[in-house]
Image: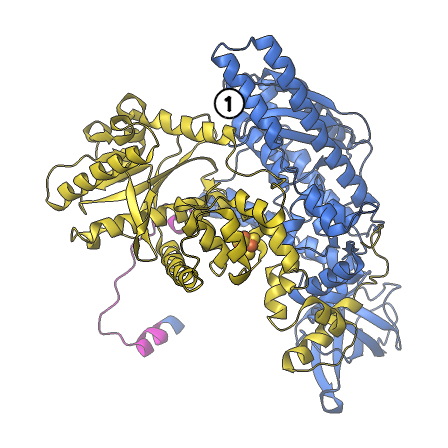
Amino acid sequence: MSTIFDLAARLLAYQAGRAIPTRRSSALMADPIPAFAIAPIRMVAEQVVYALAYGDPDDKPEIVLTWNPLDRDAGFLEPFAAALDRYLSDCVTAGEMPRVWLAHTAALEVIELLGHRYRTNRSVGPELQRMGAQCRLLAEETTFAGQQIVAVAGSLLAGHVATGQSPSEDLHLGALLAWIDPPAGTAVVDAAAQAALAPAAAMLARAADDRVEQLRARVASGRLREPAARVEAEAIIRAELLREWNLLVQARRAFWTLGLTQGPELTKLSAESFKRVAWQIDRNYGSPARPRSLAQRLDELTYAQELAAYADVADDPIVRATALSAGRVLDATIINRDQPRRGFQPCTLTLETCQQVLRVRAGTQLQLRGARVVGRITEVRELNAGQSVQLTLVITTGVRNPHLPAPGQRTDWMEPEPADLRYQKRQVYERMAASADTRVMGDTLPLARPQPADDDLATIARRLRR
Amino acid sequence: MSLSGARGLIRVAHNPTCELQAAMMLTRVREQDVYLALAGTAYPGEYGERVSARRRGAQFEKNLYQDGAAVLRGTLAPLLGVAADDLTVRDLSEEVRGSSTAAMEERARRTDRILMDLAADRIVPDLLIQPQLQLTLAGNLASAIFIAPDVLALDRQRHVYLPVEIKSFIVRDGVVAQGDRDGARRQAAIQLLALAQELIPLGIADRLPEAAIFIFASPFGMRPHPAFAEQLSAELFEMRRVLDTMAQVRTHLQALGADAIADAEALALAAPRLATTYQESCVAGCLLAQICRQHAAAQPTILGDRAAQTLGETIDLPRALALLHGAPATDEREAWLGPALREAAARFDWSTVVQGRAA
Ligand code: SF4
């Protein structure tokens, strides 16, 4: 979001005393039925899991917990491992996109750590190793722009509304929700400040944490019997866990009641997300570390980024308006259509725009929004002393398309859907790996050939040109 | 929770223009007491380090220091280029136990003697656990604060000690969370400044590089991640600026006749004459954030640092809203801002606000 757009939105929210939407379309496809939600509670600093509430967010959660995660017995996680595996595997087998809801990035961090700890941990059984692999997979999925599998409620809400507080304050999910749905009878600023007093970071509240610590210490020093301490500690942890679960459920509901539309491009994003997860669900991959796998990962990330940016502009009128004011979308009227044979090449359009910022030049490719009509600019001419611009666009794809615009029609043109060259690039990497070129695959660079010391720059340039 | 020590200096680094915070640091008045004095009620949220976090930190360090600091030696050996068994250790926390001022002073005396030995080319231990340094604030000897690096490690080639900062934060895929790393780097920078202050009179401060060593935890229990050294030039610059701020605030306090303040009520009385510069970092960092936020009610800073930078010091929120709704501009900045805000606001139909009520 641009600085001015963000400022304008926050000013209006500040004036209204409630959050305002900054998008009209959702960046997230509708939930499948059922979705799966996970609310973890971790031990501060140790980052080990005390408890997990999980299951269908429209239902009561299942709960696993331990009052002493420091004893390193991870057996209590097994029911969760089984439920997560069942959910993901069933979805993948049925060809349906899974959806895992988390409340905030702190919860995501816990899931990521479960992946780190158990994926290859030989001291646990295959069920927990599989859980580790699936947690890593979910955490990794969140690094892809536009991904549709993991919904982090806090980040999603912050990406769809603006509040009248600062971005740092928005990071607290409770405070953010107070702006989205202000409670009656309280000023929204006070409600947000009040909400921010309780942690929303997958951790026990301070008093609960101190009490559980104290109970453990008293058992360790023999001043308290374990069963009594355990009962009290587990009740505290359970109550705190349900607080986190309720926050997640409330945030999910808040997101879906924003009433945003579902753009058609979400389907492509979902398909990409599904492919990634379906491919890895039964594979326990680590993070890429070799040149070839790193290059492939970079391509995946880049493609996801480009596709998500394309989908945002195509689906959301507010994002599109922002792109338009930055000159990345062209709003133009068709002045002329030169197509000697209807439905055949050549087809040349003349467009005119009064848009102030324009980032097109001869050679720029543009796609008609909402249709597979793509063309290339061949000429840009200023008219009326720079008051308007006329462009010549040669249609390269879509000459038969019924949406091919006619003279007088007002049209939106944007960057075309990104080309998916991942397969071709993979082939290139395979060749490079096979040739074992040290410049790509080696750890050290080959020695540079020494240059004759008396060469001047002109001589070097001449030699390079040969 | 007193703001003295390295923690307080780091806080000042986050908001170096806030005189009230610097005054809390200089006067060593507890933050929650100042809150009580200003708000009339106790601070309702949590503050201070949690018992669980303290326990983990203490256990992680204990694990490194036990058995003749075997784990610590093993972790630092590759970095120091000396075999773990050849590293000699003195543990001042074992020699002088406790956290009383007297204990800290004694550890400081012993640290001084070791540094003098270093300057005189006498044999010194490779690893000095829990040394005690002193850092003079605002050029005033009476204001000196104790700075306790976890460890000082001898760089045998340079013949100087480097601070070792030990944190039980977890490293994942070789990456430390940004916030954890930044805090540790700032803390190490303060230790470097304190060490430099001690080495200057000994004539060997020039041996000190602008670097420190870090030991973080692996995701697996108490096992440390491999130690690494980092350059801290930026943090040193920042911390030197903090020391300058402290000197300025001391001068200001003296001018106000408030330099002898020793309790929260007196500081609260002086507060209206001390500058506060509420900003985003206050939200997560300072107990007084809500109080200062209320005082900044119509200032752009409550919408965040970016908003504050865009609106500048002359345009408050009502004025920005007026410009957004079409008020005529009175200067060049407003002439640019008004149309930009109007154009941005026109992009979304803000009348379709999220369900809820105006406050
Ligand atoms: S909250 Fe207030 S006192 Fe604290 S640092 Fe910010 S401006 Fe200074």
Residue at 47% in and 43% down: B180
Q: Position of residue A322 (x, y in %)?
A: 73, 66
Work out whether residue B201 or residue A102 is closer to the camera in this orientation and state it: B201
Q: Position of residue A340 (x, y in %)?
A: 85, 76
Location of residue A50 by image quarter? top right
Q: Position of residue A418 (x, y in %)?
A: 68, 57
| Rendered-image quarter of ligand 1 | bottom right
Q: Position of residue B270 (x, y in %)?
A: 51, 57
Q: Specify the chain shown as yellow.
A: B
Q: Is residue B98 above or below residue B117?
A: above
Q: Which residues are magenta?
A: A438-463
Chain to which the residue tagged by mark 1 belongs: A
Location of residue B137 by image quarter? bottom left
- SS of the residue under disc 1: loop
Residue at 58% in and 26% down: A49
Q: Quadrant of the N terminus of chain A?
A: bottom right
Q: Specify the chain shown as blue.
A: A
Work out whether residue A133 or residue B225 is closer to the camera in this orientation and state it: B225
Q: Is residue A403 above or below residue A243?
A: below
Residue at 82% in and 55% down: B358
Work out whether residue B262 or residue A375 is closer to the camera in this orientation and state it: B262
From the Cβ of disc 1, is ligand 1 less than 8 Å away? no
Asked if one can make out residue B244 in the rendered structure from this viewpoint, the answer is yes
Asked if one can make out residue A436 in the rendered structure from this viewpoint, the answer is no
Residue named by callout 1: A121
